[in-house]
Each structure stands twice: as structure tokens, then as C-alpha cells.
Image (tube, rainbow, N blue to C red):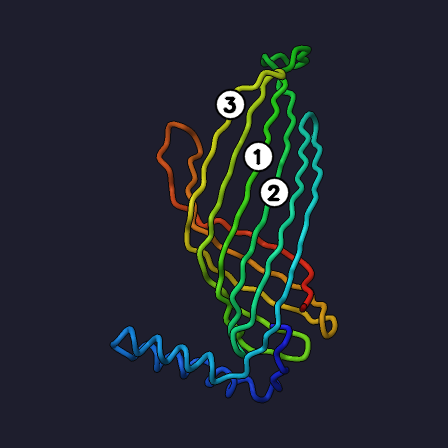
Amino acid sequence: MDGLEPVPRTAYAGCMTNIISPFISIIRCRSTAHRLILLAILLQSSPVFAAITLSVQGKYASTSQALNTSYTRGGGGSLELDLGSYFRVGFTHQQDRTDRLSYVPRSADPAPTDYQKIQVTERSSMSSVDLSLILFATEMFVPYIFGGIALQQVATEYTIDDVYIGEQKGGGGAPTGGIGFVIRMGQRFSIRATNRWIPGERQETPYVEKSKVLDSQTTVGVSFKI
């Protein structure tokens, strides 16, 4: 992605045609073997940049309101390898932890004096393998789309009045996809932003059925071309 030569804006339409046309040929093939052969030719026909890109991002947030306090911290990174002019394969891993502390009145008294201390700790992680398609590249701006497989894990611990109540766990594998862009800051450094979607489930209360949702993750980080 960072190793691409810039495409002039006036050549954008022709660039997109060159990208899409080979894929149409692949789709029209009835034989799976023929599709694999055409895909291999497509990857080999364009200049291969042996560039490896390392990206890192981190976050920290602190929220306080009345008798509720929340701290969130996390980070992640990705390692990507160029596959020709328009493709890139990569591995991404992210981890987050959120600690919430709340004091809840034990009664409906307008001036309560007795409170219940509730602590919730949530740990989440996401690992994915993605294939990216670069739409076009200018001197500074490189937009792309990506898709792949993601593995999510979530663990939530509950403590009430300093007594450990228990833990709930969830997660699993799911398809994932998204969009992103790179802003080059030089030959090796760049700023990257991505928005990823992963199918999930939501259950508002124990008394209602689960519903399908599309979870979204937005990250901004710094990339370095090795």
C-alpha cells in the first residue's frame, strides 16, 4: 500500500477499469481451477512489492459522571505483506479492557445514605486475517477495502460490594470486512484509519430473544513500512 506508485487523477477511470476487468474474467470462468489460474496470473502480472507494513494503534479513555466512573484502555497492531500492485494480505490483533465502577442507592429514598458498590470489568480481543484491495493511489491518499475472517473473545466479570459474583464469556469466529485509507507522511511513515464490520448478537435482557447486529470498530493508527 505504501509502496505503490501514485496514479494521476486524470487516469483514475482507466485505473479502475484495469482493476475490475480481470475480476470479471475470473467470475465468468465456470471451472474453479481456471479461476485459480487466472487469479495467480493476475497477481504475477503486476509488479510485486516485497514491502512489509507494520501498524500500531492505542487508546485510553476516562469518563466520570455522578457516581459512575469508567476507564478504557487498549491497543493493537497489524502486519501486512504486498501481493502485487493492488492486493495486500495482513494479520490484525486488538485488545481492550474497560473497568466500570458505580455506586447505586439501595432504596428509592430521595436522599439515600446506603449505596451498593458495583464493579464491572470487560476484556475483549479480536484477531483477523484479511485480504485488502487498493482502489487507487495518489501521492498522499490510498483508499482500500478489505475482507476476511475474524475471531472475537469477550469476558465480563462482576463484583458487588467487593464480592466476586461471576464471569460471562462469549465470542467466536465470523466473516469481517470494511473500508480504510492511508495518508502518507513520507516514504516510510503514514497515518491509517479503518472501519471494520463484524456480525454479532445482542440480547437486551434475559427475557428477550437474541437479535442479529452488525458491530462496528473504528481505529486510527500509525504505519511504518519495513
Label 2 element class: strand
Task: Determine the residue positioned at 59% across, 28% down.
Answer: 120
| Vertical comparison of 116 with 99: above or below | above
**Crowding at label 2, few (<14), some or many (≥20) Cα neighbours within 10 Å?**
some
Check if mark 2's residue and mark 1's residue have beta carbons within 8 Å: yes
**Crowding at label 3, few (<14), some or many (≥20) Cα neighbours within 10 Å?**
few
Task: Determine the residue positioned at 42% across, 48% down.
Answer: 173
Task: Determine the residue positioned at 53% across, 75% down.
Answer: 135
Which of the two labelled residues, at mark 1 and mark 3, occupies the earlier sequence position? 1
How many discs mark residues in the rendered view? 3
Which of the two labelled residues, at mark 2 and mark 3, occupies the earlier sequence position? 2
Q: Which residue is nearer to you in this view: 119 or 166?
A: 166
Q: Locate the C terminus by quadrant.
A: bottom right
Name the outermost residue toward the right.
Answer: 186
Q: What residue type is labelled 2?
A: Asp
Q: Where is residue 208 in the image (x, y as percent from the top left)?
A: 37, 32
Q: Where is residue 71 in the image (x, y as percent from the top left)?
A: 68, 36
Identify the residue position indicated by label 2 in the image: 96
Q: Position of residue 187 (x, y in %)?
A: 72, 75
Identify the residue position indicated by label 3 in the image: 166
| Vertical comparison of 37 with 62: above or below | below
**Crowding at label 1, few (<14), some or many (≥20) Cα neighbours within 10 Å?**
some
| Vertical comparison of 43 with 57: above or below | below
Q: Which amino acid does label 3 sit on?
A: Gly
Q: Which amino acid does label 1 sit on?
A: Glu
Q: Position of residue 205 (x, y in %)?
A: 43, 30
Label 3 element class: strand
Label 1 element class: strand
